[in-house]
Image: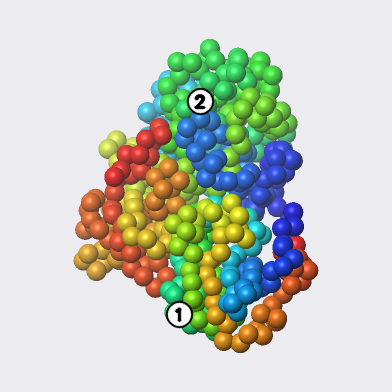
Amino acid sequence: MTLKATPLNNAHRALGARMVDFGGWDMPVNYGSQIEEHHAVRTDVGMFDVAHMCVVDLEGANVRSFLRGLVANNVDKLQVSGKALYSCMLTPEATVIDDLIIYFINENWFRLVVNAGTAEKDIAWMNKQNEATGAGITITQRRDGANAMALIAVQGPNARAKVWEVIPQAKAPTAEMKPFNVALVPGTAFGEAMVARTGYTGEDGFEIGVAADQAEALWNALNAAGVKPAGLGARDTLRLEAGMNLYGQDMDETVNPLDAGLAWTIDLVSERDFIGKAALQAKGQNAQFVGLILREKGGVLRAHQKVIAASGETGEITSGTFSPTMQQAIALARVPMGVAVGDTVHVEIRDKKLAATVVKLPFVRNGKILVA
Amino acid sequence: MSNIPADLKYTESHEWIRAEADGTVTVGITAFAQDALGDIVFVELPKVGNTYTAGDDAAVVESVKAASDIYAPVSGEVVAVNEDVAASPESINADAYAAWLFKIKPSDAAAIDGLLDAAAYGKVAA
């Protein structure tokens, strides 16, 4: 099977990246030391090829009401053009189809960004709901074909300044822009640029969308300006330190979002009905989603390791790694309801049961370690 | 990209072995292995005095992204372990052939002859 390639594939190879099969995509896992790439993002600026993710435009008179029923968060929080919202899209059984970001452009146009591995599934689902509800909206995927866009994430305390250096036209529209907002910037050297103050690292920065055939030029310009390329290895350690979920690992179509730490993204307060609401209210929360810090030497916390609470009940690590910023093994875990922040639990690693502390997420934000 | 010293022996599982004058063998992982693993963050060494049959799990090397078992290349008793590497796992990435893991006194002095030479390992680590 041929792997799919982003428009930046040649650029990665020219930089000597170690490439891997990531969900069917030929992607860079590092360009050297993933730990150095991680530190560059936390202390300075790094950039990620996220062109495998998919921009989906929803257009038409009924987009807002369509989205009200489609996703678990409430798009009526989006009233000012440019504002963004993080939400899950649920099955009728209240399990997670995907997590995504919704950008409000205008009443006839909402732009979504969905995960790479779930894009086809998501769009098929949206098409099905479009028919079922008679909403009559136009759904356009912008990853493949004529309208393709490519996303590059520039992240770190110096990210926005670097982007303004490389895309000077972006400065005026975004200098005062708050986090979780987007600006569409025309007339740049790379065509129209979507500049969103969002990211998956726990640092400040922009995720930039340009036409796919402009991506390599933008990447090279950012590189020449001193922005360090960072691969999927660093992306995973950064997002885990930031307490951010990874679809397919921390939750999937077998998982209730309330059990994946996503209650904050679900609006159960308003009268609005949405797909999965009834099932969600019926099921409620049955597990906690917590952070773990390994306290004894013996290995690295990893997905699927068993977690044993003091009560003897068990849970499971969903994502684990070695935190470069904290210099400790950390994990996200789904544990029984009785487990409390501050508890000591034990994790089975090979033939040992090693002590770990339960902590509140996130571990790290804006370069600072928040947990002891 | 070939960093395979000619004076060492090798296994298909990417360990290097050096025969010492006192009859012991020193074991580590190759440059190819450390490159594939990425940044190494944890090493678990065997206890001095442990005995192994060739092929037994003897040590573990963990990088950020994966855990890798290290096997005893020959049967014998562990006579020394490298505490410096346990304290600084990243030294394996810096110089895989300097960052030895453990030393074995082989139960069969000729066993090392059965291991791969540099040319044969070069085909494995292509």
Q: Which mark is residue B50?
A: 1
* Coordinates of residue A205 in the picture (x, y in percent): 50, 28
Image point 47% across, 27% down: which residue?
Answer: A157
Q: Is residue B47 visible?
A: yes
**Residue shown at 54%/41% (left/top)?**
A36
The quarter in which the C terminus of chain A is drawn is: top left
Instruction: Tell me the number on the disc at residue A158.
Output: 2
Image location of residue A168, percent across then percent down? 60, 15
Above or below, A83 against A345 in this view is: above
Number of marks present in the image shown? 2
Residue A43 in percent (x, y) is at 47, 32
**In the image, what residue type sits under mark 1?**
Asn
Q: Is residue A22 above or below residue A15?
A: below
Residue in view at x 22 percent, y 64 percent: A310
Q: Looking at the figure, which quarter contains the N terminus of chain A?
A: bottom right
Say which of A280 and A49 sits in front. A49
